[in-house]
């Protein structure tokens, strides 16, 4: 099962090219970021990143997931916005 927080975490790692920078930007610990990425890797059935000495680069599956994750997160944000606007009207 996919979790929105996992996708959000994944996009931060992808964009920052670093687990530690993603953790800092999410105000969490690196071990939680790693756990979330591992859960996504189990879901996908393949590694999402290649770990390098200085950061990470995405795999082909990581590239595919990123494109879809960005769309899903954008759609969820739009949905939340619609309902916030309706509640304030």
Image (cartoon, rainbow, N blue to C red):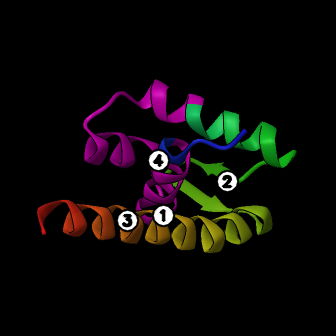
Magenta segment, principal secondary structure?
Answer: helix
Q: CA distance from mark 2 to mark 3?
A: 26 Å
Disc 4: CA contacts within 10 A as few (<14), some (14-19) or many (>=20): many
Q: Residue at x 55, y 74 (%)?
A: 71
> In the shown orientation, is residue 36 left or right of residue 85?
right
| Residue 5 position in % (x across, y down) | 47, 43
> Please, which residue is most extreme toward the front here?
89
- The question of residue 39 being in magenta is answered with no
Q: Quadrant of the N terminus?
A: top right
- Of the image marks 2 and 4, the number of the one nearer the N terminus: 4
- Of the image marks 3 and 4, the number of the one nearer the N terminus: 4
Image: magenta residue range: 6-35
Q: What residue is shown with label 1?
A: 73
> Please, which residue is most extreme toward the right here?
45
Q: CA distance from mark 2 to mark 4?
A: 13 Å
Q: What residue is shown with label 3?
A: 77
Q: Residue at x 45, y 63 (%)?
A: 76
Q: Residue at x 87, y 45 (%)?
A: 45
Label annotation for residue 49:
2
Q: What residue is shown with label 4?
A: 9
| Residue 59 position in % (x across, y down) | 74, 63
Disc 3, disc 1: CB below 8 Å?
A: yes
- Of the image marks 2 and 3, the number of the one nearer the N terminus: 2
What secondary structure is found at the residue carrying circle 2? strand
Q: CA distance from mark 4 to mark 1?
A: 11 Å
- Of the image marks 2 and 1, the number of the one nearer the N terminus: 2
Disc 3: CA contacts within 10 A as few (<14), some (14-19) or many (>=20): few
Disc 4, disc 1: CB below 8 Å?
A: no
- Of the image marks 4 and 1, the number of the one nearer the N terminus: 4
Closer to the eye: label 2 or 3:
3
Disc 2: CA contacts within 10 A as few (<14), some (14-19) or many (>=20): many
| Residue 70 position in % (x across, y down) | 52, 70
């Amino acid at each position: 099962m996919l979790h929105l927080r996992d996708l959000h975490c994944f996009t931060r790692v992808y964009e920052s090219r670093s687990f530690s920078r993603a953790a800092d930007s999410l105000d969490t610990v690196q071990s939680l970021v790693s756990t979330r990425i591992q859960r996504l890797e189990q879901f996908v059935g393949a590694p999402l990143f290649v770990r390098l000495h200085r950061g990470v680069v995405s795999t082909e599956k990581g590239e595919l997931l990123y494109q879809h994750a960005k769309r899903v997160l954008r759609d969820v944000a739009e949905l939340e916005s619609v309902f916030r606007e309706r509640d304030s009207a």
